[in-house]
Image: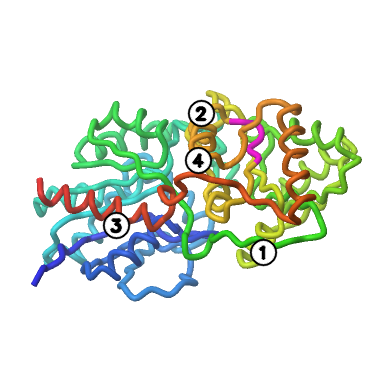
Amino acid sequence: MNVKPKILIIADGFGKPSYNPRLRSLCDYLYAQGYPITVVVEHIADLPFGHDYPIRELRLYTGGKADWAVKNVWAMLTDWKNRKFSALVEQLYGSETFDIVFCTTFHTCPLRAAIDFGKRHHLPVITDIRDLAEQAPGNQVNYLAHQARALRMFVRPYQQVNIRRRNKQLEQADCITTVSPWHVAFLRRINPHTQLIYNGYDAHVYTPEDVPTNEFVISYCGKFFGEPIQDAKPLFEALAELKHIPYRLIIHTNPEGQRLLTHMASEYGVRAEVNGYIPQSEVLQLYRRSSILLVLTNRASEQNVHGLMTTKFYEALGIEKPVLCVRSDEECLAQVIRLTNAGIAATTAEEVKAFILDKYSEWQAKGYTRQAVKGKQDFSRQQQVQQFEQLILQCLHK
């Protein structure tokens, strides 16, 4: 009988709106394959999803801004949060036997808990880093401000302290995984044992389906922050010259995004239906009756974001709908769009205009559009979790 290794999974918790699909996909897969897994996370919100494996949530905050503020200042001075998380994990699981520790986080916590547990019990540790403070160098204050104005003076020193602590933990990991080529290049300066495992789409949900429609729909569902993070000007400049086409521009976004995009549509004289978020089931329906799916980004630079591989791109790839990425990041996302033939990463309004006209002709001929993508299976969550499994087995073999 082949006994599967027992895995302790330590993570930063399941938060809205997507509840960490990268982690959930991995846990679902490992459990289905017969791996004994124990999952311990920070408590963020009540869990709305079903799971057959145990999840232990550690509540580090009692609620309220005052509690959050005091504990975060104390954490900056003493590393309280990481030390507390580490102590709780040892208290709960120190007497159990595991074969390997896997940790995933969007920032720093709970890296220390994973490294401490691994060192204390002589176990290999894999750390998965989904975001880096350095990927948004021009927006570091907003990255951690959490709308708490009184604490903004502490954000930059807090971040600098956290980065030093994070790097110390990452140096000790047996292996690091991360989400884009930019992240890999950055993290290899800290730990050479860094590998790329992209995010992806759920191949069981995001499947192609040709849905003929009597409307040419261009849609966007996702956050919009405006410049410098996202530059939608080439899109609106192009649409302003395409008033003879009976398109529908449908946008579902955050409140600030609604304000910004409504203003842009009015400024350029573009027809646009801008509203709030809709349920994920409705998003998928909108995707399938759309002829073009928008991915709104901007040229990667020190003023905005590096290595941004938005989930919306992967979802469009899965259902094989044409992607119009505007403005092109001229970095990781543009490279993958070219690699997969998913659409276009446009830098000018003329490129946007030509792409829209091409897809409009396809829609006129067939009643729908479908992109001839290449190698999309390499970007599915099903492929992603198998990559994690192989890495876990490799670390154990070493």
Q: Position of residue 227 (x, y in %)?
A: 67, 32
User: Is the C-beta separation of discs 2 and 3 under 8 Å?
Assistant: no
Dot 3 falls on a residue whose secondary structure is: strand
User: Is the C-beta separation of discs 4 and 3 under 8 Å?
Assistant: no
- Circle nearer the viewer, 1 or 2: 1
Amino acid type, mark 3? Ile
- Circle nearer the viewer, 1 or 4: 4
Q: CA distance from mark 4 to mark 3?
A: 33 Å
Q: Can I make out residue 101 in this image? A: yes
Amino acid type, mark 1? Gln
Q: CA distance from mark 1 to mark 4?
A: 23 Å
Dot 1 falls on a residue whose secondary structure is: helix
Q: Which residue is mark 4?
A: 340
Q: Is residue 68 magenta?
A: no
Amino acid type, mark 2? Glu
Residue with the most extreme front position: 365
User: Is the C-beta separation of discs 3 and 1 under 8 Å?
Assistant: no
State which region is magenta: 324-328
Q: Which residue is mark 3?
A: 10
Dot 4 falls on a residue whose secondary structure is: helix
Q: Which residue is mark 2?
A: 331
